[in-house]
Amino acid sequence: MGPRLPMLLKDAALTAFVAAALGLFIVGFRTVDVGSTKGLAFDYQFVDLAVAVVAIFVGRLGLSFAADGQRWPALVLGTVLGVIGASPVRLPSSFLHWFVGLAGLLIIARTLWPSAEQAIDQAKRFPQGRRFGVAGVRWLAWILLAAAVILPVTPLGDQKTMDLGVLILTYVMLGWGLNIVVGLAGLLDLGYVAFYAVGAYSYALLSTQWGLGFWAVLPLAGAFAATFGLVLGFPVLRLRGDYLAIVTLGFGEIIRLVLINWVDLTNGPAGIGSIPGPTLFGAVFAEKAPPGGVTFAQMMGVPFSGTQRLVFLYYIILGLALITNLFALRLRRLPVGRAWEALREDETACRALGINPTNTKLTAFAIGAMFAGFAGSFFAAKQRFVSPESFVFIESAIILSIVVLGGMGSQIGVVLAAVLLIGLPEWFRDLGTYRMLAFGLAMVLIMVFRPRGLIAHREPSVRLHARAGGGGG
Amino acid sequence: MAYFSQQLINAITLGAVYGLIAIGYTMVYGIIGMINFAHGEIFMIGAFISLIGFIICGLLGIGSAPVAILLVLLVAMAFTAVYGWAIERVAYRPLRGSFRLAPLISAIGMSVTLQNYVQLTQGARPKPGGQIVSGGYNLFSADGFDVRVTWLQIIIVVVTIVLMASFTWVIARTQLGRQQRACEQDMKMAALLGVNVDRTISLTFVVGAALAAVAGMLFLMYYGVIDFFIGFLAGIKAFTAAVLGGIGSMPGAMLGGLLIGLIEVFWAGYFSSEYKDVAVFGILVLVLIFRPSGLLGKPEIEKV
């Protein structure tokens, strides 16, 4: 193991010591209520803390070995942690199983990473390899699309899968919308959920107050959200990147607080209920038709079933998401899209070349907002209920982490990230509790280890001189 | 008049707490030019460590309030400072020299992580802190209304003034302060002249976290109840305070904190308490649009 072992051990011990100091109060003493009388009592968690500290010691040692190029000790430590995490050996809590197991996986991934990267680099050196990489991504996109289209008619398309599919596709659409703002134009928008809220409340109010249908409101909701984007964006888009982020966060919170407090219009925290769902050529998806209406089941002459509505919703959101994607892909090749990418890389140079930064950013902001508006009105139609609770900051953070994890600017990356971040925790209920913790950690780890995202992609969409197999999508 | 005076006293107390948090934002921004989005969460962790510290004091049978407060203050400052150090080490230091938005995204991730970490370990329910200091002093009566300043409010203002004074001294007179100001002006040059830049930045986070811990303890004592989510709103308000005063400027952070306290309390007192947060967010937006350098800050010159 070499002469560096004492140093690595010392380093790992130091890390474990810091971890123990961090956890001593927050983890070690769990405060619990004692009945209705005042005061709190402790539920001591020192065993959990000790297990976590030992895991951190071993984990840090493994990572150091990996960084040092000593692969075998690192792999052994990683495997040991992984096996303990996955085994039925009883650790004090299920969280610790995940924690220990994932630490093991991290070490193994970190150890094998250099050779994997080397292989990819080697493959990229040949034009065939590069072309294969580009084609591979394109094939993956078509396969995913085909799978998404036929999913409802396969035996897999039961109620649970359809629900999950609708949820994932909603986030895919939001991710693609935000990708225009963050990935292409390089504007960090932390209040994206505000436009989603505008779309949702547009449909909720217009349908319940004026009786307008989903398809009539959909373009209106997009237009409202885009207008909001223009009005909010105009004064603030001159700001530097991080200031812009905070101001958009402030706007997001202002809109949420207005939704809570403007009770006359929005019904406040109680929300708006009994919103009608979308119709297909006037046919409703319900067991009984409203007076003068017709149900989908009657129209098609098939027996009524609850999944019909879900499948219909699924195809609507699939269509909306694909429109978003197509729009973004086309926009990239237009002058405005090229200006976005140029602006992202160097604003000063763009100004010198005669691009108006404010107008260019404003178009990105408004178009991104428009898609959030579409998604919002779909959300209202799906849930049949909206309340300010659905539009908190954490939603913006989730959408942002999908874009970041996918690699800012990559369209297929957003899909994979949405499946990973939304799908996995819904599938493994056990994981659901730790979902937000995982989101936060994923954002930090991605920034530290792969700041360009899982699928690294920040090539310009259009090149002056085409390279072999160049271009991107 | 009486109502006004009472509101003024409440506003100064609140402003003191915001000012203490705002210093953390302004110092970090001054030295590495990033918004430490997780700073509000550090404040929240400071409040939780204080809560646990007070309960331990109760179990150990430390009856005297001043001793308990001093002990908890020191413990909370020390242990929260470790969080400040660790966050910088794990989430920000590897990103120096990465693209501009990377540290901010990492900071948002850290903020989400810390919030959920405390929610998982301590539970989501609000935690009552109990009353540690009670009683107060009636200043004067007018219009059938007693203007009252509580001992707690006096403690909060005195602690804040003492900390701010000693902190100003540290920045102006000590080795650390000089190194910090050197790094602020030109990090590369400071490094060439033998300043340990990494250490200086780490210490900046440590000091900021310690001050946030004090703010957390004062917040716990003042409101008597905390939960894992308090860091978000308090963090944004303190950030607004830092921006209003001129981000990067220490006196600006204190002034900004005071002004935000005044705006919030008077808005709630004279207009509507529902929209008091909207007022603060509105101030943030307006300041950033019309005077991004704040009241006491220097305008930023863009260099290519």
Image (spheres, rainbow, N blue to C red):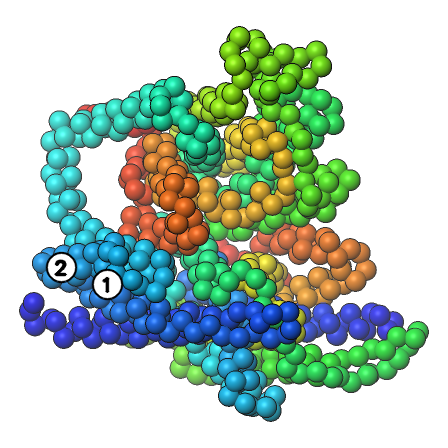
Amino acid identity at mark 2: Val
Are there few (<14), some (14-19), or many (20+) residues within 10 Å of tag 2? some
Q: Residues within 10 Å of mark 1 (few under 14, many from 20)?
A: many
Q: Residue furthest right?
A: B143
Quick check: A66 above or below B181?
A: above
Q: Please say if B227 is above or below B150.
A: above
| Chain for disc number 2 | A
At a point 44% along the width and 83% down the height, the residue shown is B174
Q: Position of residue A377 (x, y in %)?
A: 59, 29
Give the numbered dot on residue A59.
1
Q: Secondary structure at mark 1?
A: helix
Residue drawn at (49%, 65%), measured in percent from left and top?
Answer: B122
Name the image quarter holding residue A299.
Answer: top right
Query: How many numbered circles does the render carry?
Result: 2
Pick the quarter of the image with the N terminus of chain B: bottom right
Residue B162 in which image quadrant: bottom right
Q: Is residue A427 left or right of residue A61?
A: right
Q: Is residue B135 above or below residue B301?
A: below
Q: In the depicted view, which residue is nearer to us: B249 or A348?
A: B249
Residue under the image location 43 percent in, 57 percent down: B113
**What residue would you read off at disc 2?**
A76
